Amino acid sequence: MMKRKNRSIHLRTLNAVCALLLLASGLAILFSGFQIIAVAGLLLAAAGVATPIIVNGDGVLEVITEIFEAILDGILSIFEAIASIFASLFG
């Protein structure tokens, strides 16, 4: 299993927000079809995740893997926040 990279809190927050927007846009497209707002949200989320990685990227393959890693890190951050909320309520 890979170790998580230490990223700044700003980058992790950006990844979490973009991953949430990516999931919400994907669900909106799934349920209501391709609408301009859902597609724009999808593109904005992908651009928000990809921009810091492309700026710091070395090679094409590394940029692609870092983008997927950032999306998964954002989704993981969302689940960590949900788990933290439930732990504070019931713990």
Image: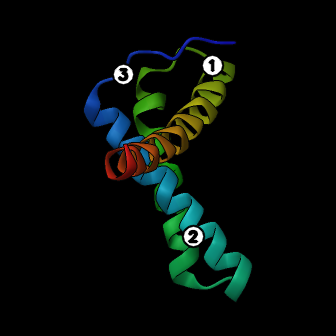
**Mark 3 touching mark 2, by CB under 8 A?**
no
- Report whether 4 appears left or right of 86: right
The residues bearing labels 3 and 2 have C-alpha atoms spaced at a distance of 25 Å
Q: Which residue is mark 2?
A: 25
The label nearer to you, 1 versus 3, is: 3
Q: Is residue 19 left or right of residue 8?
A: right
Q: Amino acid at mark 1?
A: Glu
What's the CA distance linking mark 1 and mark 3? Answer: 16 Å
Q: Which mark is residue 62?
A: 1
Residue 19, image x and y in percent?
51, 51
Q: Quadrant of the N terminus?
A: top right
In x, y percent, where is residue 76? 53, 39
Mark 2 surroundings: few (<14), some (14-19) or many (≥20) residues within 10 A: many
What amino acid type is highlighted by mark number 2?
Answer: Ser
Q: Nearer the viewer, residue 89 or 68?
A: 89
For mark 3, give the secondary structure: loop
Q: Residue at x 46, y 45 (%)?
A: 83
When asked about the image quadrant of residue 22, the answer is bottom right
Toward the front, the furthest residue is: 91
**SS class of the residue under badge 2?**
helix
Name the one closer to the observer, 55 or 22. Answer: 22
Cβ atoms at labels 2 and 1 below 8 Å apart: no
